[in-house]
């Protein structure tokens, strides 16, 4: 009467066995999936290790290349600096030559101008002396218009004129 129904118990056990068998199947599938995933994980970790090793090698190569590039750049800077110093030296030497040539040319021009001015001055003094001589020749002493000889302008013709101011070619220094 209130006992167990054998059909229900066996049905329940069958369902329970089916569930256990399904769970066992799922557990086996899960274990297979875990094994597959672990194998995949090991493979990926192996690849990652290879990539890390390759990355380390690449980093070392990058550092070496950077160091070499830095050395090359420093060498280029030294070459450019040396070339710039040489060019500056050449430019300064060229500047000195140009200034020297300009000074030489200016000196020549000043000397030529001084010689020209001296020749003109001598010509003027000579003309003036000639005029004075003509005036003196026409006026006799004691006559009106007579001019007494002036030692400034009446010096002999073979010596340069002397000036009373204390300056000029014949003045005492």
Image (cartoon, rainbow, N blue to C red):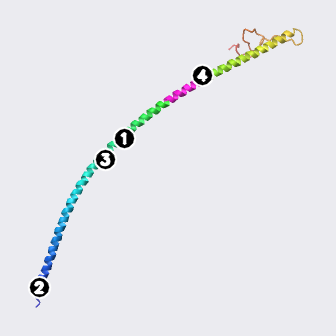
Name the residue that disc number 1 marks. 69
Give the left or right position of residue 45, taking residue 161 as reference.
Answer: left
Query: Is 29 within the magenta?
Result: no
Residue 97 magenta: yes
Instruction: Residue under label 2, please give it.
Output: 7
User: Residue at coordinates 21% horizontally, 62% vertically from top-left?
Assistant: 37
Residue sitting at 66 percent across and 19 percent down?
Answer: 112
How would you rate the neighbour count of disc 1 (Cα within 10 Å): few for under 14, some for 14-19, many for 20 or more?
Answer: few
Residue 166 vertical position relative to residue 33 in the rendered view, above or below: above
Q: Which numbered disc flags the more N-terminal residue, 1 or 2? A: 2
To which residue does mark 4 refer? 104
- Measure the C-alpha gap from mark 3 to mark 4: 66 Å
Q: What element carries label 3?
A: helix
Magenta residues, as a range? Answer: 89-103
User: In whole angstroms, how far apart are the C-alphas of marks 1 and 2?
Assistant: 89 Å
Query: Which image quadrant is residue 77 in?
Result: top left
Could you say where residue 148 lies in the image, as x and y percent from the top left?
83, 11
Q: Marks 4 and 1: in contact by CB < 8 Å? A: no
Q: In which quarter of the image is the N terminus?
A: bottom left
The first of marks 2 and 4 along the sequence is: 2
Asked if the residue under mark 3 is in contact with the one under mark 2, i.e. CB atoms within 8 Å, the reply is no
Residue at position x 37%, y 40% in the image:
70
């Amino acid at each position: 009467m209130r006992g167990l129904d054998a059909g229900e118990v066996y049905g329940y056990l069958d369902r329970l066995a089916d569930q256990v068998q399904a769970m066992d199947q799922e557990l086996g599938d899960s274990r297979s999936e875990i094994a597959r995933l672990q194998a995949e994980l090991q493979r990926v970790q192996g690849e990652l290790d290879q990539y890390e090793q390759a990355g380390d090698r690449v980093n070392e190569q990058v550092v070496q290349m950077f160091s070499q590039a830095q050395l090359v750049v420093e060498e280029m800077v030294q070459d450019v600096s040396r070339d710039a110093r040489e060019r500056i030296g050449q430019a300064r030497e060229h500047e000195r030559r140009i200034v020297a040539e300009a000074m030489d040319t200016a000196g020549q021009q000043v000397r030529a101008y001084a010689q020209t001015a001296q020749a003109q001055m001598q010509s003027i003094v000579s003309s003036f002396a000639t005029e004075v001589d003509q005036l003196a020749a026409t006026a006799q002493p004691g006559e009106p218009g007579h001019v007494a000889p002036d030692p400034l302008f009446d010096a002999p013709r073979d010596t340069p004129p002397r000036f009373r101011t204390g300056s000029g070619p014949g003045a005492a220094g």
